[in-house]
Amino acid sequence: EGCAVCALDMTANPHAYQKAIAIAVREIKRMAEHGLSESEFQRCISALLSDSSQLAAQGDRLSNPDQLQFLMESVSCGHTFMDPEQLLFATELVAKTLSIEEVNEVAKEVCSHLANFGDPGAPIPSSIVLCAPKDIRVSEGEILDSFMEAAKQDVEASDDVLVPKSLINSEYIAKRVADFPPSFDRMKDENVDKSVEVGVITRQLSNGIFLNYHPNDAESQRAYLRVTVPAGRIDELGMKLGSMHVGVRTLQEGGAMLGLRREQVELFCVDHLIMAEFSCSEELMWMDFIFPTSKVTEGEDEIT
């Protein structure tokens, strides 16, 4: 509490922890040696400004725990505690003065404890904590050897990824809207359920899909969408056990769509502050999306 630390948290299959360490250390070493590319730097600046804009939009709606966490972080890092509007103004001023050389110099310093692990005179982590199942035995020497071996890897600068302005072509969306105009079914809409107790409103679209929604003033410019499909693990009859769950995880981890690679989709989501998670239960498959309800940064690209 109240202290500044640089930490790396990893979760891995117990029998593949060495591979997880190798991948994590390789990426950290890549950042230390090569830093950000110019396009990555610009995307980080854009995401920083978007995040600060959303914080300013929420204003005094931030909860007390969030305010306290923000205060503790400011004190531990030597920052000035500000009102969100003031913080946005200061962030915009500072962002204009940042250079990629300055950022990469700081990245090199922050990543040095793992990038140079095992080198004579190099800084070392103050602690390494491992939590493993009871039947897994890992010694201190094995952990240290894994980090030292990982730090010896040769790394190259990452390939620059072209991030799309939109995941779905705007002309295609316009055509689909024209062919299938979205509307609420008036006949079915007579059965609108407005639950006073929880504030949830249920309506039905003309294509038969039910929609539950609940306005929430506490989450300014932020929305949460869950799409549910009645096709959970109970539908695995005739298939291999766990196939539905593996399929859903493939959607989550694969991430590719249409003609776009996973890296492009992932960076698009990062740039636009979009979070997505897919999972399934015994009865349902669901897709969760958290995203801005309105664009908070300047530009022509859209969230589609």
Image (cartoon, helix red, strand yellow):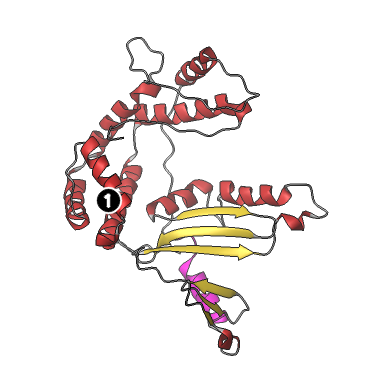
Asked if the stretch drawn in magenta spans residue 86, the answer is no
Which residue is outermost to the front? 197
Q: In which quadrant of the rendered image does the N terminus lie?
A: top left
Q: Who is closer to the viewer here, 139 or 114?
A: 139
Residue in view at x 19 percent, y 54 percent: 83
Q: Would residue 46 be visible to someone looking at this image?
A: no
Residue 58 is situated, as x and y percent measured from the top left of the image, at: 29, 61
Residue at numbered disc 1? 67
Within-10-Å neighbours for mark 1: few <14, some 14–19, many 20+: few
Q: How many numbered callouts? A: 1
Q: Quadrant of residue 188?
A: bottom right
Seen in the image, is 206 located left or right of residue 59? Answer: right
Residue 72 in the image: above or below residue 278: above
Residue 175 is situated, as x and y percent measured from the top left of the image, at: 53, 76
Residue 260 is situated, as x and y percent measured from the top left of the image, at: 52, 53
Seen in the image, is 53 located left or right of residue 294? Answer: left
Say what secondary structure mark 1 lies in: helix
Mark 1 residue type: Gln
Residue 72 in the image: above or below residue 258: above
Magenta span of residues: 166-181
Which residue is outermost to the right? 238
Q: Would residue 253 be visible to someone looking at this image?
A: yes
Dominant SS of magenta comes to helix
Q: Who is closer to the viewer here, 121 or 154?
A: 121
Residue in view at x 34 percent, y 23 percent: 112
